[in-house]
């Protein structure tokens, strides 16, 4: 489960990244992407994006996982995957010089931002939702067990011959029973909401994978075009 510090870092970094987008309206340099600094930022972003593939390849390959986990654990690799993606996105946005000159660039940056946002959802918010859902289900099981125990005690008391004090005791037993019913009802509603949120987040993970495929395809085209037409800063 994500702790408060990691949650704060995630929120701040993601907000900072998204705040770079309005900078395109305030500043642009059509020649920066082809400059030495622009090339360095773009190359750094491309290298980091390639390194991002290490986590999914390791996760889905038993042989590679056995090899990689000798040096680094999967949680550490996942953390690198998340934060390296953010750094790569920063480098890529700065590389553009806040200037889009082609549909390819627009599509590449758009897909990249989708990958980053959906990736943060999968990395931080989906596990948190799943953890809260497990806690709610465990609490619900406890309440149902208490309800069944209390109901059984009341049913047993009904079959006995009761005097006045017995009737008062039975009346007192009905109070926690009603509280248990209310608690169970509230938890069932909360679990339904959590399951709906989890379903939405799972769809976001599918969007993350799809956007990543599109991003890498566009990145390959972008790099190939740069190689074909030459690096302007060398001209």
Image (cartoon, grey):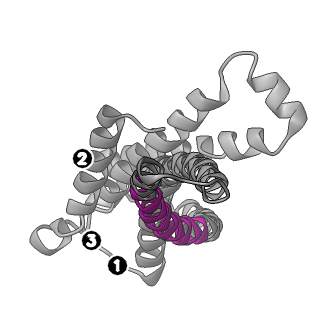
Quick one: 17 or 229, which is closer to the camera? 17
The residue that appears at 30% across and 32% down in the rendered structure is: 5
Q: Residue at x 60, y 40 (%)?
A: 51
Residue contact between numbered discs 2 and 1, judged by CB atoms under 8 Å: no
Between the C-alphas of marks 2 and 1, the distance is 29 Å
Between circles 2 and 1, the one closer to the viewer is 2
Q: Which residues are magenta?
A: 175-203
Residue 101's disc is 1
According to the picture, the residue beneath numbered tag 3 turns out to be: 99
Locate residue 219: give its quadrant: bottom right
Q: Mark 3 and mark 1 in contact? Answer it, CB < 8 Å.
A: yes
Which label lies toward us, 3 or 2? 2
Q: Is residue 81 above or below residue 68?
A: below
Q: Is residue 207 visible?
A: yes
Give the percent coordinates (x, y) of residue 37: 30, 45
Predominant secondary structure, magenta span: helix
> Is residue 115 part of the magenta span, yes or no?
no
- Label 3–label 2 contact, CB within 8 A: no
Q: Secondary structure at mark 3?
A: loop
Q: Disc 3 to disc 2, how far (Cα)?
A: 25 Å
Which residue is rendered at x = 17% and y = 70% of the image? 22
Q: Where does the C terminus fall, quadrant-wise? A: bottom left
Q: Nearer the viewer, residue 169 or 44?
A: 169
On screen, 63 above or below 49? above
Q: Few, some or many C-alpha atoms within 10 Å of disc 1 (few <14, some 14-19, many ≥20)?
A: few
Q: Which of the 4 quarters of the picture holds residue 205?
A: bottom right
Residue 12, disc: 2
Instruction: Give the structural element (helix, strand or loop) at label 2.
Output: helix
């Amino acid at each position: 489960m994500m702790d408060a510090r990691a949650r704060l870092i995630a929120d701040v970094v993601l907000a900072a990244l998204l705040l770079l987008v309005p900078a395109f309206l305030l500043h642009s340099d059509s020649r920066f992407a082809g400059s030495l600094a622009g090339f360095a930022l773009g190359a750094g972003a491309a290298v980091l994006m390639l390194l991002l593939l290490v986590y999914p390849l390791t996760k889905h390959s038993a042989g590679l996982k056995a090899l990689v986990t000798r040096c680094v654990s999967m949680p550490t690799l996942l953390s690198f995957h998340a934060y390296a993606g953010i750094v790569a996105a920063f480098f890529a946005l700065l590389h553009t010089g806040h200037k889009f000159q082609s549909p390819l660039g627009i599509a590449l940056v758009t897909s990249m931002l989708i990958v980053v946002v959906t990736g943060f959802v999968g990395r931080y918010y989906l596990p948190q939702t799943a953890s809260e859902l497990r806690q709610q289900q465990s609490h619900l099981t406890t309440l149902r067990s208490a309800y069944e125990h209390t109901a059984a005690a009341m049913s047993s008391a009904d079959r006995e011959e009761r005097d006045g004090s017995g009737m008062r005791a039975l009346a007192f037993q009905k109070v926690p029973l009603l509280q248990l019913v209310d608690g169970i009802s509230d938890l069932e509603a909360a679990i339904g909401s959590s399951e709906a949120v989890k379903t939405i987040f799972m769809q976001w993970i599918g969007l993350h994978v799809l956007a990543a495929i599109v991003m890498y395809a566009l990145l390959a085209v972008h790099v190939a075009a740069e190689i074909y037409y030459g690096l302007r800063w060398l001209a």
